[in-house]
Amino acid sequence: MFILHEYERVSRQKINADKSCYYIHKKVADGLSQEVQQITGFTKGDSPFTYLGCPIFHARRQKIFYKDILKKVRDKLQAWKGKLLSFGGKAVLISCVLQSIPVYLLSAMVPPKCVIKEPHKLFNRFFWQTKHEGTSKHWSAWENLCYPKNERGLGFRSLYDISKALFAKIWWRFRTSGTLWSKFMWNKYCKRFRPTVSKLGAFHELLPHQEQNNEIGDDLEDLMDSSHWNYAKMQDISNEIDNQWWIHTSSGKFTVKSAWERLRQRKQRSQVYKNFWLKGLPYKISMFLWRVWFWKLPINEVLQKMRINIVSRCWSCHVQKEIMDHVFITRPFARRIWSYFPTAAGIMGPFIQIKQTVLLWWSFNPLARLKALYQAIPALVMWQLWKDRNTRRHGGSVSYVKVKWKFPRNGHFKCNTDRVSRGNLGPSSAAFCVRNSSGDFLYAMERVLPDTTNLVAEAVAIEEGIKYCISHDLFPLIIETDSLTTQKILDGIWDAPWSISLTVRNIQRWRKDRDVIVKHVLREGSCAEDFFTNLVFDFAGTIQYDHF
């Protein structure tokens, strides 16, 4: 008690006995335990207990000691509906939220494998979940997903590897820092042994086997000639102070990322796997291509290999068995699709197997600006073929709309408008293009606008287009815009926001005395205007075209 009283005297802080506990081994006699309680005034605490977020115990590690961290993961999953989330949404939540929950615990201690395995089960169940209740098919083990994307994985990180990397950080501090804890560990475990080869409890299992007998940073070959020491070189460096250097980073400073990269499990890398995750391609389509490549789809051929008894037949031709290559390549509907796109792209068949077809597209060498398009087309085509297969299998309908610019009626004129706003309150531009009933180009103009929104830029484009048509008497007039919001505002279905109220008032006033119709068209129907709005950013001011 002298130490406690001395602490109170020096710190001027009173120890609250009601909030304090003492811990003693369970085999200690009850009389001695009661004597400690009478002297200190503290209550006896039970082991294990949690201190600063970590379980403290004296017996063998057990799964029940880590129940709090598992409860945190389960509580997070209770609030999320896996059925309502896409694969991309689940991947973000797992990577950014769920996998970060155990990081603090793993940075302080090494749980048993059964504890780390439990969150992996929860992650995998959530990722493959397709219904609210019951179980769903796990198409891949979690360990196979915890590899970089160019190593057949999905970019998740295994908690086993994270635990090794975080404990490597403790090991590095033990070797390089002069803290009280480090000195205690040196004196307790390393009086006669090198720390990389002595059994330092949990430290011993930290390093890879190939590094347990080699001191990191020792470069003795430079000090030797053949099999003899070079004493001249040794003399040159004898007066230098040795510094610890982490050889896995260029700066020599330890980082958890470099430790993880060094200690993690690996598979052979391939550019093919990296091509699945093309920038700009929706995650669901990239994920679908990954599942196709590794046979992770519920097609009859795959289900039969899982010993699920099912009659296999193609839901498109009703003749052949449903196998992967038939669904995506050789069935009649798929053949028509694959014969259309490769012909337009200049790629020659034959197209027999999935991997052979995809690699044929990826190995083609088009113009640099078309490279990404050629990489994306196989995934987009197979995605539509898969939707067609599911529609035939489960019912419903799939509609394909061919969008192109349509000629106006004889004697009418058409004005297509478009806008772009980089940031949707940022640098903007507006453009319009006028054609006659024969499709002949009459006039086009685009101009840069001050920082504004898409809605304002679209209204300005329509206003400028009508002004030009009024000055040249180009009526009856059809205005086509790819902004459905703007079309509904001009037709009076929705109220105009204050930012475009004056512009809308001018347009409505001009429409009263003239035959002007505003229509909505998909973006693909205004390709020329879209080109103009992006082109104008390379120039300053306004650009006008009156002939081609």
Image (cartoon, helix red, strand yellow):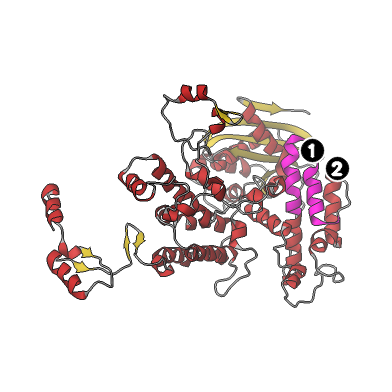
Instruction: In this rendered view, identify the residue nearer to me: 111 or 75.
Output: 111
Is the Cβ of the residue at disc 2 closer than 8 Å to that at disc 1? yes
In the rendered image, the quadrant that contains the N terminus is bottom left
Task: Look at 44% across and 35% down and name the residue there.
Answer: 244
Which residue in the structure is indicated by mark 2? 346
Which residue in the structure is indicated by mark 1? 366
Q: CA distance from mark 2 to mark 1?
A: 9 Å
Say what amino acid the circle numbered 1 marks. Answer: Pro
136 sits left or right of 79 in the view: right
529 sits left or right of 86 in the view: right
Q: Determine which quarter of the picture holds residue 464.
A: top right
Is residue 49 shown above or below 458? below
Element at badge 1?
loop
Is residue 409 shown above or below 69? above
**Farthest front residue?**
228
Residue 285 visible from this viewpoint: yes
Q: Determine which quarter of the picture holds residue 389.
A: bottom right
Task: Look at 49% across and 25% down and name the residue there.
Answer: 234
Residue 292: image tag? none
* Residue density around tag 2, few if under 14, some if 14–19, many if 20 or more, within 10 Å: few
* Residue density around tag 1, few if under 14, some if 14–19, many if 20 or more, within 10 Å: some
Element at badge 2?
loop
Q: How many marks?
A: 2
Is residue 286 shown above or below 257? below
Instruction: In this rendered view, identify the residue nearer to me: 119 or 323.
Output: 119
In the rendered image, the quadrant that contains the C terminus is top right
Say what amino acid the circle numbered 2 marks. Answer: Gly
Task: Look at 70% across and 55% down and name the residue there.
Answer: 289
Residue 178: x %, y % from top left: 34, 40
**Stretch of the chain drawn in magenta:** 352-381
